[in-house]
């Protein structure tokens, strides 16, 4: 089973992905925990290029770099894991490209879909958990996390609020477009409260 987590920066998806992986392992499931950008062998280099404050990339370059990493990630990490029966829990995947590069940057959706299909061979998650949190709240979290860490990955956090609103609206539109696959989850409250919501969905839909 292939499960992805999505949402705007600071929505808490990284913590929730880790908690889900732990729950599944506790139930005897083999879990590969991974993320985009960064999960493939070329991931660290591309992540540095994509997220560093100093990079000034065209939207089309950005799209192609995310897709290049995804192509390696799917072929070398995700598909092999799924083929041996493991679960893959991935922090961001194709919906991030749709939300950020199509809705956020304004690239044509058909171009984004064509590039994504080439990179993935059509592999889509069985379940996508979309953590919903008001943009102002999520951004405050993401920015304070970045200012207290030594990370130089602030390129997206530094974008204007209007950009993040387009991304958030993009995720909402995607949830309407793919209602069977994308499940919105209220990202408010403690991490335990959010996880209870996720556990409920996963148990109901995936019978674990
Ligand atoms: P991530 O590491 O998930 O950062 P955060 O935990 O702060 O949300 O993602 C890094 C950034 O990459 C994030 O701002 C969204 C962006 N991104 C895209 O624009 N397109 C994509 O296809 C992916 C996977 C990520």
Image (cartoon, grey):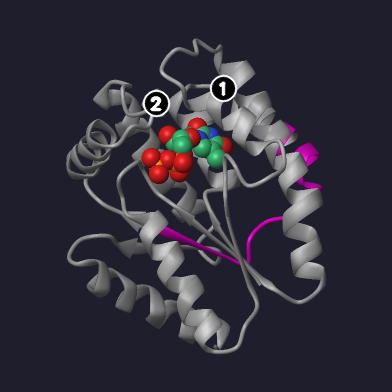
Q: For mark 2, does the 10 Å Cα neighbourhood hold few (<14), some (14 to 19), or many (20 or more) residues? A: few
Name the residue: 47% across, 22% down.
Answer: 105
Say how many tags the image has.
2
Position of 181 with respect to 100 (left or right) is right
Query: x and y percent of residue 77 in the render?
Result: 74, 55
In the rendering, which numbered label is found on residue 49? Answer: 1
Q: Which residue is mark 2?
A: 152
Q: Which residues are magenta?
A: 115-130
Secondary structure beneath dot 2 equals: loop
Mark 2 or mark 1: name the one nearer the start of the chain: 1
202, above or below 45, in the image? below
Magenta stretch contains residue 96: no
Query: x and y percent of residue 92 in the render?
Result: 52, 49
20, above or below 24, in the image? above
- Which of 48/121 is in front? 48
Name the residue: 54% across, 67% down.
Answer: 180
Q: Are marks 2 and 1 in contact (CB under 8 Å)?
A: no
Query: x and y percent of residue 181 in the render?
Result: 55, 64
Tag nearer the camera, 2 or 1: 2
Position of 29 with respect to 102 (left or right) is right
In the rendered view of the protein, which quadrant contains the C terminus?
A: bottom right
Magenta stretch contains residue 120: yes
Position of 17 with respect to 145 (left or right) is right
- Which of 48/107 is in front? 48
């Amino acid at each position: 089973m292939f499960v992805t987590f999505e949402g705007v920066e600071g929505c808490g998806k990284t913590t929730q992905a880790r908690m889900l992986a732990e729950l599944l392992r506790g139930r005897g499931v083999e879990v590969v925990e991974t993320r985009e950008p960064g999960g493939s062998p070329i991931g660290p280099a591309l992540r540095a290029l994509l997220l560093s404050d100093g990079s000034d990339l065209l939207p089309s370059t950005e799209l192609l770099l995310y897709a290049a990493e995804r192509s390696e990630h799917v072929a070398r990490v995700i598909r092999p894991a799924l083929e041996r029966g493991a679960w893959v829990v991935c922090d961001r995947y194709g919906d991030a490209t749709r939300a950020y590069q199509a809705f956020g940057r304004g690239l044509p959706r058909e171009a984004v879909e064509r590039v994504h299909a080439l990179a993935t061979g059509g592999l889509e998650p069985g379940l996508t958990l979309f953590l919903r949190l008001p943009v102002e709240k999520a951004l405050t979290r993401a920015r304070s996390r970045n200012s207290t860490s030594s990370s130089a990955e602030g390129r997206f956090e530094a974008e204007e609020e209007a950009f993040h609103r387009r991304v958030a609206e993009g995720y909402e539109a995607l949830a309407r477009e793919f209602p069977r696959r994308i499940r919105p989850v209220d990202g408010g409250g403690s991490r335990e409260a959010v996880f209870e919501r996720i556990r409920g969905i996963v148990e109901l839909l995936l019978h674990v």
